[in-house]
């Protein structure tokens, strides 16, 4: 069963909080009823700033007024792409849009994000989300292909992965869920991913992204008429969803009977998707990074031979061990990689 990865303390709960924020130099005025909301919103942003993987020389993706400029030049591996893009919506089937009776909650969450800005940095949750999407964009070919394969809205899948992992393909939750899809070992195995002490394919975006898309397709096949149950299936687990339906019935009001964390999971994902779908309206932008495929396009499959380790392979092929690990994110234990293991060099 898929268990939730992160708790929702990073999000501001539209069920309970309203917020106003003003700052003059170092003075911050907050009403007592909104102190918690502001603290959480700022924590949400600061947590993302501490994440690793930032790339220098990034170029903003602008969506305001539909103006998109392009400044391109060849990029070395690991350097920031100069190509500018604006988020677009694809596969706009009703299935992947917010439930009409819940859209106000999603809109309210976006407004809260917009208002939760640090007086010192001038940044807030929207900036964090932009950073997550930027990191996820490295694997955009996998996202586009898996979305097409499983008939899922591409922006929805992007939003799901960004929220689940905070843009970190090696993210690990307190419950031991890992990777972009934040799968537990059991669920990962059910989706055909290899997980052991040496190899963990949950950390390989080329595997975990497809697994996440497949998992969402499973949910869509079961609960087409209730979109909030799609994310509940992912966050709360299929077993718990079935129990909730049995207890409360399958209807629109079931959403309000779900755990708070599961409700917020839905609201946050569809709020991110709405930012992507309507980038001009919200003036939402993100940095496009070099794609993983473009960096590893000249790689080749290699089967480790007897007596070889990654250092030996790197030396014989004039490579860097760090680059081999980058190309093979599934490797957990360098020393444990055995003869016969298939890698890319």
Image: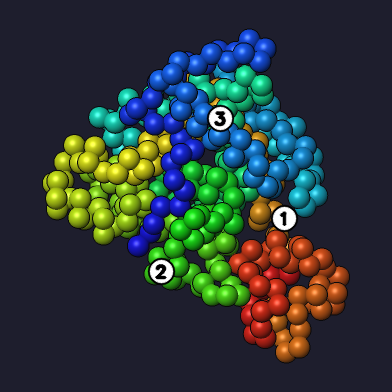
Q: Residue at x 51, y 72 (%)?
A: 195
Q: Which residue is mark 2?
A: 186
Q: Which mark is residue 146?
A: none
Q: Residue at x 71, y 65 (%)?
A: 325
Q: Is residue 212 above or below residue 115?
A: below
Point 57% across, 22% down: residue: 117
Which scheme is used to colour this image of the protein? Answer: rainbow
Image location (x, y in percent) of residue 345 = 73, 70
Q: Residue furthest top?
A: 24
Q: Is residue 295 above or below residue 260?
A: below
- Give the mark nearer the N terminus: 3 vs 2: 3
**Residue on which the image places disc 1:** 295
Mark 3 — residue?
42
The Cα atoms of the two marked residues, 3 and 1, are separated by 34 Å
Q: Is residue 93 visible?
A: no
Does residue 192 appear left or right of residue 283 in this picture?
left
Residue 59 x/y as whole percent: 71, 33
Relative to the observer, which residue lies in front, 140 or 282? 282
Q: Nearer the viewer, residue 114 or 24?
A: 24
Element assignment for label 3: helix
Q: Are marks 3 and 1 in contact (CB under 8 Å)?
A: no
Q: Looking at the picture, how far across and down is residue 197, in whole percent?
A: 57, 75
- Gap between marks 1 and 2 measured at Cα: 32 Å
Q: Is residue 226 left or right of residue 105?
A: left
- Mark 3 crowdedness (10 Å alpha carbons): few <14, some 14-19, many ≥20: many
Q: Earlier in the sequence, mark 3 or mark 1?
A: 3
Instruction: Give me the C-alpha separation between circle 3 and circle 2.
Output: 34 Å
Which of discs 3 and 1 lies nearer the camera? The answer is 3
Q: How many marks?
A: 3
For marks 1 and 2 on the same chain, the one whose residue lies earlier in the sequence: 2
């Amino acid at each position: 069963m898929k268990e939730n990865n992160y708790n929702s303390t990073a999000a501001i709960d539209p069920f309970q909080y309203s917020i106003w924020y003003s700052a003059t130099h170092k003075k911050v005025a907050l009403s007592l009823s909104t102190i918690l909301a502001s603290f959480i919103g700022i924590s949400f942003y600061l947590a993302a700033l501490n994440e690793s993987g930032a790339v220098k020389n990034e170029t903003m993706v602008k969506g305001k007024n539909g103006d998109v400029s392009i400044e391109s030049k060849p990029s070395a591996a690991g350097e920031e792409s100069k190509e500018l893009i604006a988020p677009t919506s694809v596969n706009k089937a009703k299935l992947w849009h917010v439930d009409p009776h819940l859209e106000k909650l999603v809109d309210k969450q976006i407004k809260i994000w917009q208002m939760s800005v640090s007086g010192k940095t001038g940044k807030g949750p929207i900036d964090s989300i932009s950073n997550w999407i930027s990191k996820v964009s490295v694997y955009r070919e996998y996202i586009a292909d898996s979305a097409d394969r499983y008939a899922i809205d591409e922006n929805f899948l992007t939003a799901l992965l960004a929220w689940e992992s905070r843009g970190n393909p090696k993210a690990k939750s307190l419950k031991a869920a890992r990777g972009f899809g934040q799968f537990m070992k059991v669920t990962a195995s059910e989706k055909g991913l290899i997980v052991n002490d040496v190899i963990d394919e949950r950390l390989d975006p080329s595997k975990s992204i497809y697994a996440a898309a497949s998992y969402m397709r499973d949910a869509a096949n079961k609960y087409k008429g209730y979109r909030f149950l799609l994310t509940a299936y992912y966050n709360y687990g299929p077993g718990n969803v079935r129990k909730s339906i049995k207890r409360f019935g399958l209807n629109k009001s079931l959403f309000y009977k779900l755990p708070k964390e599961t409700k917020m999971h839905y609201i946050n994902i569809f709020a991110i998707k709405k930012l992507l779908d309507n980038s001009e309206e919200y003036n939402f932008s993100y940095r496009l990074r070099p794609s993983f495929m473009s960096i590893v396009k000249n790689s080749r499959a290699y089967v480790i031979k007897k007596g070889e380790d990654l250092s030996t392979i790197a030396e014989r092929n004039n490579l860097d061990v760090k680059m081999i690990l980058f190309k093979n994110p599934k490797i957990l234990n360098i020393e444990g990689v055995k003869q016969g293991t298939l890698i890319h060099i």
